[in-house]
C-alpha cells in the first residue's frame, strides 16, 4: 500500500540482496513534507512572515545566555531567512518582477 499522492512504482521494489534499500511506501517524513510543500499553493505574505521570524530568531540569538542556545537560534533563523528567499518560487518570482520593471 502506498501513501496518497505518491505513485506506486514497481521498479523501485527492494532487492533482496541489498539490505539498505527501503521498501515502497517507506518514504521518510522529511521527503513527504518536502513533497507536500512543493504541491501546495503559496499563502499571501508567507515569505514576509517567514523572513520576520528568521530575523527575530537571529536577533534573539545574540541575547541567549548559552552558546548552544545561540547556535540553535542562529541556525534556525538562518534557515528561515533562506527559506523566505527561496521558498516555493520566491527567488524566481522576484527575478521575473525585476525583469518586467527593467
Image (spheres, grey):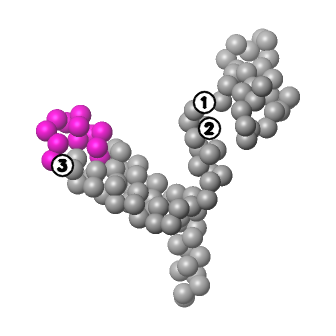
Q: Residue 32, which numbered label?
A: 2
- The quarter of the displayed image where residue 92 is located: bottom right
Q: Nearer the viewer, residue 5 or 11?
A: 5
- Please give the range of residues in magenta: 63-74
When the figure is inspected, residue 2 is found, relative to residue 64, above or below; the finding is above
Query: What separation in Å lies between label 2 and label 3 (alpha carbons)?
Result: 34 Å
| Numbered mark located on residue 62 in the image | 3
* Dots 2, 1 in contact, CB < 8 A: yes
| Residue found at x 18% / y 49% | 62
Q: Main secondary structure of the magenta part?
A: helix
Q: Is residue 85 visible?
A: no
- Badge nearest the viewer, 3 or 1: 1
Question: Upstream in the sequence, badge 3 or badge 1?
Answer: 1
Quadrant showing the N terminus: top right
Q: Which x, y percent locates residue 29?
A: 57, 32
Number of marks drawn: 3
Q: Position of residue 59 (x, y in %)?
A: 23, 54
Helix, strand, or loop for circle 3? loop
Cα–Cα gap, marks 2 and 1 = 6 Å
Q: Is residue 63 visible?
A: yes
Q: Secondary structure at mark 1?
A: loop
Instruction: Residue 81: give x, y in percent of width and height.
Output: 39, 56
At which x and y percent is residue 67? 19, 36
Q: Pointer 1: what residue?
A: 28
Q: Residues within 10 Å of mark 3 (few under 14, many from 20)?
A: some
The image quarter containing residue 97 is bottom right
Amino acid at each position: 500500500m502506498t501513501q496518497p499522492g505518491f505513485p506506486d512504482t514497481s521498479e523501485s521494489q527492494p532487492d533482496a540482496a541489498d539490505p539498505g534499500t527501503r521498501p515502497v511506501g517507506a518514504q521518510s517524513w522529511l521527503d513527504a513534507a518536502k513533497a507536500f510543500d512543493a504541491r501546495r499553493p503559496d499563502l499571501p505574505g508567507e515569505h514576509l512572515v517567514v523572513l520576520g521570524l528568521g530575523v527575530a530568531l537571529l536577533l534573539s540569538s545574540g541575547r541567549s545566555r548559552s552558546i548552544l542556545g545561540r547556535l540553535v537560534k542562529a541556525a534556525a533563523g538562518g534557515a528561515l531567512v533562506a527559506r523566505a528567499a527561496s521558498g516555493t518560487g520566491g527567488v524566481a518570482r522576484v527575478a521575473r518582477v525585476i525583469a518586467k520593471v527593467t
